[in-house]
Image (cartoon, rainbow, N blue to C red):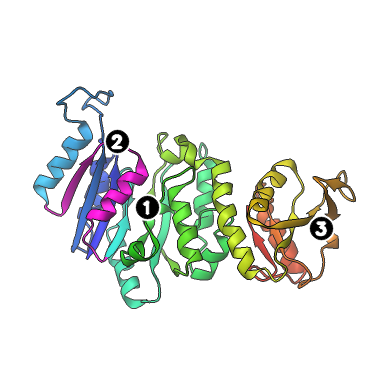
Amino acid sequence: MISVLLPVHNAASTLPNALDSLLRQSFADLEIIAVDDGSVDRPDNSPGDEPGTTSATRAVLQEYARNDRRVRVLEIKHGGIVQALNHGLTAARGEYIARMDADDVSHPERLQKQNDFLRQHPAFGLVACRAAFGGSAEHAGGYKRHLDWTNTLLDHEQISLGRFRESPLVHPTVMFRKELVDQFGTYRDGPFPEDYELWLRWLSLGVRMAKLPETLYVWNDPPHRLSRTHPRYGVREFYAAKAVYLARWLAKHNPHHPKIMVMGAGRITRRRAEMLLDYGVEITAWLDIDPRKINRQVAGRPVIHRNEVPPPGRAFLVSYVASHGGAEDIENFLRGRGYLPGRDYMLAA
């Protein structure tokens, strides 16, 4: 019924907890597709790739597979997360695909509850769940704030409206219908976050998504997490990925297309917003509160005080203000002026 997609690379120390949490699920009709992405870790945790050496990760996987036939181990040459994910998708036999990371833990009821949701809501293609943060809030405040924010996005409208601000889903918390892969494609490899691109693509194609209100996953934050170390998860890469799909969304939903006004006139904000220009979007003005910029031309466009924002219906606004608390401030301001998200404005940071 459910194929759990578990890409693994040099994760011998955390893998047992992850596998145990899956094998203890109340929903037992599952297979664990453990894709060993060329692990070379040794039992003493020192790297090594001598011919004929069994990695510590592979030894863990093989032991679990011997003890429980629901564990299927696929071994591939190291090629990265996208190759491992797609290799696992090809081998998956379940009606539903659930994701899991090798350094996290799933609550015993997670798969049952997500399975029940998809069974009971045939119009939805994907369901995630809330997650608890397993790292240090003091040393990883950004990750913790991101998780806290994603945990507020539960229904499809919230996820849809939040998609251009940040990734609205924690990748390993999702379960989706396998038929979506056949209809809309697998993970894509490129200079962008593979999961965020997938959510943006599927949402743009009409896939309905939801998130269970229960906290059914522990999202740990090891220092070697790919989103910390791989360039595809850089800030610029996130904005470049969202620009493609935001421009498409604006072409469909902005009544003033291709014209928009942008909240924020700082250098970084302008650089991110101007990525839209490559896709036919026209920025007519910047809205800001910095007195040094008001009534001046910046990058060839006028800077207007945000208090002089046109009435709702006269313009479409996109906010790129990314400072901590900035999005909330912008949203409160615009709602106070009668602007509605998705109709009159969209948050993109």
| Picture layout, residue 12 above or below residue 333 | above
Amino acid under disc 3: Arg
* Res 14 → quadrant: top left
For label 2, count other residues whose C-alpha is less than 10 Å away and answer few (under 14), some (14-19) or many (20+). Answer: some
Residue type, numbered disc 1: Pro
Q: Quadrant of the N terminus?
A: bottom left
Asked if residue 87 lies in the magenta stretch, the reply is: yes
Q: Nearer the viewer, residue 86 or 318?
A: 86
| Boundaries of the magenta span | 69-95
Q: Residue at x 26, y 34 (%)?
A: 39
Q: Which residue is mark 1?
A: 172
Q: Secondary structure at mark 1?
A: helix
Q: Nearer the viewer, residue 165 or 260?
A: 260
Q: Distance of mark 3 from mark 1, alpha carbons?
A: 39 Å
Tags 2 and 3 touching, CB below 8 Å: no
Crowding near the residue tagged with mark 3, few <14, some 14–19, many ≥20 C-alpha atoms within 10 Å: some
Q: Distance from label 1 to label 2 (Cα)? A: 20 Å
Residue 223 in sight: yes
Residue at screen point 77% across, 71% down: 312
Query: Residue 179: where, in percent of width, then height?
Result: 32, 67
Q: Is residue 236 left or right of residue 331?
A: left
Classify 227 as above or below 113: above
Residue shown at 73% from the left, 57% from the top: 282
Q: Secondary structure at mark 3?
A: helix
Mark nearest the camera among 1 and 2 is 2
Q: Earlier in the sequence, mark 1 or mark 2?
A: 2
Tell me the residue that label 3 is attached to: 306
- Expressed as whole percent of the image width and height from the top left, the position of residue 237 reads 54, 43
Q: Which mark is residue 78?
A: 2
